Image (cartoon, rainbow, N blue to C red):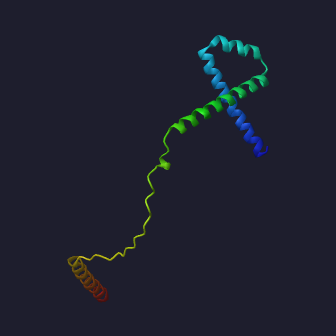
Amino acid sequence: MYPDDLSQTLQKGFRVTLGATASLIEAIQDPDHSGQKFSELGTDVNRLTEELEIKGELTEREARQFVDSLLSQMPNPFTDASPEPRATTITTVASPVVNTSVQNDLEALTQELAAIRLEIELLKGQV
């Protein structure tokens, strides 16, 4: 099966399903008329499929027109009348901010850690 055949089959299936759904809604709304229409078709599956596909195609077209009309009535937020803001480039340089008390504490802790490490090495050498 070629890709075109597959897409046509899927489209036909979609339209038949859409037509069947539209026919079901019509049957619920007017059971006498729909019963008469389906009794005329009889048991001819191909004819029934063609009728449903045609009905589905019409329903699809009507739905597209309805959606297009709704979209044409809505204001488009992307075509606003206000001018676009101009993009400007700002060059900045980051400089580290150092709190002197934190820096002093860090240096003291580093010296303390070095002293503890040296003491551990000396204790290891005694064993």
**33 and 105: which is toward the camera:** 33
Identity of the residue drawn at 27% across and 82% down: 110
* Residue 44 placement: quadrant: top right
**9 and 103: which is toward the camera:** 9
Residue 70 point in image, percent of width and height: 54, 35
Residue 60 point in image, percent of width and height: 65, 32
* Residue 123 placement: quadrant: bottom left
**109 and 104: which is toward the camera:** 104
Is residue 8 placed above or below 51 in the rendered structure? below
The total number of labels drawn is: 0
Is residue 15 placed above or below 44 in the rendered structure? below
Residue 16 point in image, percent of width and height: 70, 29
Is residue 94 placed above or below 119 in the rendered structure? above
Horizontal placement of 98 versus 12: left or right?
Answer: left
**51 and 124: which is toward the camera:** 51
Q: Quadrant of the C terminus?
A: bottom left
Instruction: Point out the residue furthest to the top here.
Output: 32
Residue 6 point in image, percent of width and height: 74, 41
* Residue 83 placement: quadrant: bottom left
Q: Quadrant of the N terminus?
A: top right
Horizontal placement of 89 versus 60: left or right?
Answer: left
Horizontal placement of 10 versus 120: left or right?
Answer: right
Identity of the residue drawn at 75% across and 23% down: 48
